Image (tube, rainbow, N blue to C red):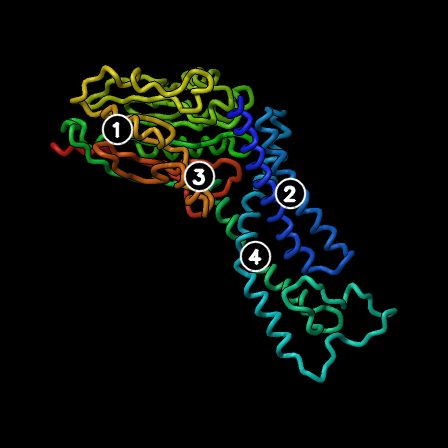
Amino acid sequence: MVETVLVGIAVLVLVGIVVFAVVGAHLYVWRRLVRDTTIAESRARRIGTAVVVTAPLLLLGATVAELLSAPFAVVRIIAWPGYLWGALFVYLLLALLVGEPIRYLALRRFARDRPVSEPAVAAVAPETAPAAELSPQKDDPVEEAESVGAALPRRVFVSRVVGGAAVAAAATTVGLGAHGVLNGPTVKHVTVPLAKLPRGADGFRIAVVSDVHLGPILGRGFAERVVRTVNDTQPDLIAVVGDLVDGSVEHLRSAVEPLAGLRARHGAFFVTGNHEYFSGAEQWVEHVQELGMHLLANARTELPGFDLAGVNDVQGVRTGQGPDFGKALGDRDRSRTAVLLAHQPVLIDDAVAHGVDLQLSGHTHGGQIWPGNYLAGLVNPTVAGLERYGDTQLYVSRGAGAWGPPVRVGAPSDITVVELASLQA
């Protein structure tokens, strides 16, 4: 009982810290982009304030609406502006922090260059010049030096230059990142040498598809692009390693319909990701089979030259449907090569213990939005790419789609064609 209370208190404290940090960061962005660049009580300040207040509320609303299974039409309406603000805010904050020393030095320079004989503020009668336009803001790093032109204070001029540059940089970054996602994933090729793979399986090609995240933002058109890209690689097998959807079968039936067109010589195989368990896993494992995929739910199948196994995502533990390596791999012939489909890279230790030769995973998105890759690296053994753990190799795809903001920066989306190479060939 005491432990439960302590955990609850710790969670509340953590939530409080996060909320305080987020609110504080938004206040900072408002100050630099709105308050410091506009005249008090002006229309521009009111509009800017409304944007900075409304946008995060839309982001929060979109997140909560998805978690509470709100009407899909409502989620779609608020998801686009809400999630895009999430990405834009990250880069506005970073750009403004980078510009902070520039802003400070510019104001210092204006103060130093002001002639001693000139007054600090133009002598204008109070009745002809509102105090709000000429009075310095006392909490700035440098008090107002002089005016630019008739009424624009130096502080406002410098803030507009720095703020405008920050907005341009952030908007360009997010725009290019969104274009990369919406344009569809690129194809990446990786060769994985396997010691036990027989010569007959040398060159076997697996198209790894992860983290498509079909939902309120990425819909049927995106699914069609993914299918087209996969089929153009002409793989021997397609491995869909989880997080296919963000939403129920009822809402996304039309969006996922193109996936029935996936084609490979040995078919398409599917394992669950954590988001399937947020979206009705039981219904989805049934529906993907109706689409023609083979379900590997803690199961294994023998293919020419190697065993292909799949385990449920760790999120399934909450419903008694978590990963079961014993069921999937326990009684197999270890002289044969084993390829494992597992959504999360954190399962690599279990894979090593069960003699898996290659684990194919997703989940991380490669961080999706820089510097998210550093955060992903704190909780995942591999964020993206191929790495070796003992006798087991782990390949982590960055994923085909995006979760939350349809934006990727520093982590381009991909569909990876993994070619198995026999060391006996």
Residue farthest along the right direction in this orientation: 127
- In terms of sequence position, does the residue under pointer 1 or pointer 3 come before the other? 3
Whole-number angstrom distance, CA of label 4 to CA of label 1: 45 Å
Whole-number angstrom distance, CA of label 3 to CA of label 2: 27 Å
Dot 1: element: helix
Q: Residues within 10 Å of mark 1 (few under 14, many from 20)?
A: some
Q: Position of residue 396 (x, y in %)?
A: 34, 36
Q: Amino acid at mark 3?
A: Gly
- Residue contact at pointers 2 and 1, CB within 8 angstroms: no
Whole-number angstrom distance, CA of label 4 to CA of label 3: 31 Å
- In terms of sequence position, does the residue under pointer 4 or pointer 3 come before the other? 4
Q: Amino acid at mark 1?
A: Val
- In terms of sequence position, does the residue under pointer 2 or pointer 1 come before the other? 2
Q: Nearer the viewer, residue 418 or 116?
A: 116
**Residue 242 horizontal side relative to residue 96, left or right:** left
Residue at 63% across / 34% down in the picture? 61
Whole-number angstrom distance, CA of label 2 to CA of label 4: 18 Å
The residue labelled by disc 3 is 184
Dot 4: element: helix
The residue labelled by disc 1 is 352
Whole-number angstrom distance, CA of label 2 to CA of label 1: 45 Å
The residue labelled by disc 4 is 96
- Residue contact at pointers 4 and 3, CB within 8 angstroms: no
Instruction: Using the image, determine if residue 171 lies above or below residue 354.
Output: below
Mark 4 vs mark 3: in front:
4
Q: Residues within 10 Å of mark 4 (few under 14, many from 20)?
A: many
Q: Nearer the viewer, residue 255 or 269?
A: 269
Q: Position of residue 421 (x, y in %)?
A: 19, 34
Rendered image: mark on residue 55: 2
